Amino acid sequence: MKKAVVVNDVEKLKKIVKIYDIIGIGSEFCHNISMKLFDEIYKELEKILKNKKIIIYTPILTDLIFDNFVDKLIKILYKFRDVEVMLTDFGLLEYLDHKFPNIKKGISRPLSIDFVRMNLKNINKFLNEWHINSIETNEVDFVEKFKKRDFKLYLRIPLKYVAASRFCPYERKITYSCNYECLSFYDELQIKNCNEKLILFENCYFKKMKITNYKKLDFDMIIETIYE
């Protein structure tokens, strides 16, 4: 199985890029992070990424930010030959399906938590209608439920998605520009009256996944998040 990684820090990416076959950039949760990385990669990293498969993560977009976000995304789509876009926003899904029908598209975790509770017939119908290539999940039961499928399943490790908010915990507001304090930073938050901890990373809350034998599971790809 090919090695895949998601990194939201360009300097870290430069150090590990040779280790991985597939590189994920961007964020499912924050447009500021995604657009910053698009700009940096467009300017700096074409040569070292040109022979890699690129997975681009995209968040929910408001009307105010949509056009600017799409302009930056398009530059990346034209720059690399092997690209898959992971989607959280239905407006962006519709746009790409119309404007870039040949680009691979996937469903990322903020949406896939609902898909795992659907039946296979309805999932396949939706994915075929919108030409979806893959679904990414943290839920290992997903692969057992959908052994016979027309789409690819990606397992994202080691952080399990719990919840996200457009309210930035670092800026303490909803913002369209920031100082990127969250990059290369995470925090562990103790849950009251519980032994578990939540992990704050970007503008999202996670739990650490407990399963370790990932490679024995029948996923099409296992994608590691570098957050420490």
Image (spheres, rainbow, N blue to C red):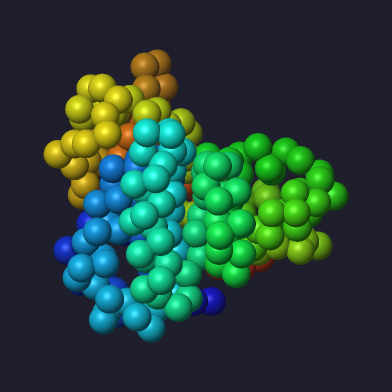
Tell me what residue is drawn at x 60 percent, y 48 percent. Answer: 94
**Does 142 sit left or right of 155 as displayed?**
right
Q: Residue at x 85, y 50 (%)?
A: 121
- Which residue is outermost to the right? 121
**Does the image show residue 219?**
no
Is residue 95 something one can see in this rendering?
yes
73 is higher (above) or lower (below) than 114: below
Vertical placement of residue 63 versus 220, above or below: above
The residue that appears at 41% across and 22% down in the rendered structure is 194
Q: Residue 10's image quarter?
A: bottom left
Of residues 216 and 127, the one nearer the viewer is: 127
- The picture places residue 69, in percent across and down from the top left corner, at 36, 48
Identify which residue is drawn at 55% across, 63% down.
100
On the picture, is 137 further left or further right than 115? left
Coordinates of residue 29 in the picture (x, y in percent): 40, 40
Percent position of residue 151, x then y: 70, 62
Rendering quarter of residue 188: top left
Relative depth, front residue between 204 and 25: 25
* x then y, percent, for residue 206: 41, 37
What is the total number of numbered labels drawn onto the structure image? 0
